[in-house]
Amino acid sequence: MADASYPEHLLYHPDHDWAAIDGDVATFGITWFAQDALGEVVFFDPPAVGTQVTKDEPYAEVESVKAVSDVIAPLSGEIVEVNEALGEDPEAINNDSYGAGWMVKVRLSDSSQTGVLLDSATYQGTLS
Amino acid sequence: MATTESSSLRRTPLYDAHVAAGGKIVDFAGWEMPVQYAGIKEEHLAVRSSVGVFDVSHMGEIETFGPGAQAFLQHLLSNDLDKLAVGGAQYSVLCREDGGVIDDLFTYRTGEDRYLTVTNASNHGKDLAWFRRQAESFDCTVVDSAEASAMLAVQGPLAREVVQALSDQPLPGKFRTGRRRIDGLDMLVAGTGYTGEDGVELIMYAEHAPVVWEALLRRGAQPIGLAARDTLRLEVCYHLYGNDLMETRGPIEAGLGWACKEDTGFVGSEAVRAVRTAGPSEKLVPFTISGPGIARQGNPVVGGGEVTSGTLSPSLGVGIGMAYVPAAAAEVGTPLQIDVRGKLRDAVVATKPLYQR
């Protein structure tokens, strides 16, 4: 498992999710803190492409050996792509939570929502 | 300011050793216990392929001794105590009058008139009260030795080799027990465990536990947390009290009829006999999930019944578990549908054990 990190270029939701913004599309995933708390991820149940997700609401489930947890959408929009590779390799969520462990790409319905997300330093402040 | 909630939780003599070994500590049945160290899968596979050591000092011990000890335990425990020789080990359940399961336990006969019974941590207090109340009309003494005792389980294909190297004498065989000096320290060694692997359990004075733990680690035993203990036991379909066993269900429904000898007249035997004769209306069955997904405790089975234990099997790579289902749906090979948080998952009733080496 990689060391704790919270890349500067990402935006963070206090429920331990990250978003990488590229124009009107954002990539979502869970933070290092979230994957560490979950333990080894063994199953990722993705939503279907075309599903509407709502900021602060669950959009997927991620399951470790111990328990199942909801994954919260940091922003609202429509899912345009899901990370199919996680079906075969859910451990990527642990090993590379900001890279190969990405979960979905979402076409944002309200890009002004990004304003309430946290930067890396502020998010890390919520963890202590 | 939050109150120090942890002050009410108990710690085993190995708490510091767990923290030093990188253990992630959680509250389990009122104890601060390590749920994992290196990772559940790695720990699980270490026990299947080499050797692991578990701190199970949260479990309780009740000693019963005196001329009436055997008659007393025969009255209380479901199995036949006449079949338990000195140096032997026997599994049984403790039943209420109505047959409901109070606990499941291993009893070791440590002397002619001397027995040691290991209780589940969450049940120790109620078991002890039950023992004491029932003991009043027998010529025996019941002693709570949980506080003074620590217990380690050393499990895996290399477990005996590791413990043997520290022992003054050959180790007791499977389902046998005896006193040995391990790393020079006197303790009870039993050929039992909860993983489906070969191994021993060591019951010692609490103050000796840190030294023995270190000696086992030095010999190559890997520390294993409670999470892997759960996945290991579920792969071989061992019951977990509070999940698969409860006071509202009896031992026949749970598939523990083999540990019940009604002719001994134990407390609850009439109720158990009635269920055995009529046939239980529901049965505990092992299952495997056919596709993706993992069923969990409490998930309903379509058509009746519920999952009592469920996880992803680290050895098999599929969802496994145990569920109470209507007796008509208990045959091996019967397809089941399990409602996993609103999604129906296909499963099939499987044979025990789910994992076989």
Image (spheres, helix red, strand yellow):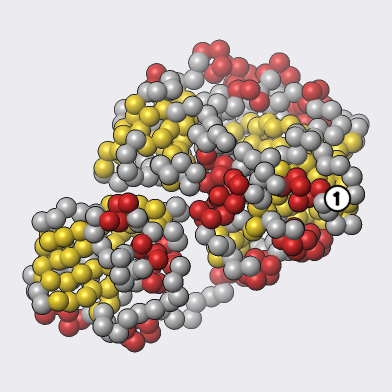
Query: Is B300 situated above or below B227?
Result: above
State the image coordinates of residue B190 (x, y, percent, origin top left).
78, 41
Q: What secondary structure is found at the residue carrying circle 1?
A: loop
**Residue flagged by tag 1: what amino acid is it?**
Ser
Parent chain of label 1:
B
Residue at x-position 86% and y-position 42%: B170
State the image coordinates of residue B300 (x, y, percent, origin top left).
35, 37
Query: Is B335 situated above or below B312?
Result: above
Please state, as top left, top right, bottom left or bottom right, where the C terminus of chain B lies in the image.
Answer: top right
Residue at x-position 57% and y-position 42%: B233
Q: Is residue B170 left or right of residue B270?
A: right
Q: Which residue in the structure is indicated by mark 1? A: B167
Query: Is B47 situated above or below A7?
Result: above
Q: Is residue B95 left or right of residue B108?
A: left
Considering depth in this image, is B325 or A27 the residue closer to the camera? Answer: A27
> How many residues crowd mark 1 within 10 Å: few (<14), some (14–19), many (20+)?
some
Q: Is residue B72 left or right of residue B289?
A: right
Residue at x-position 74% and y-position 31%: B90
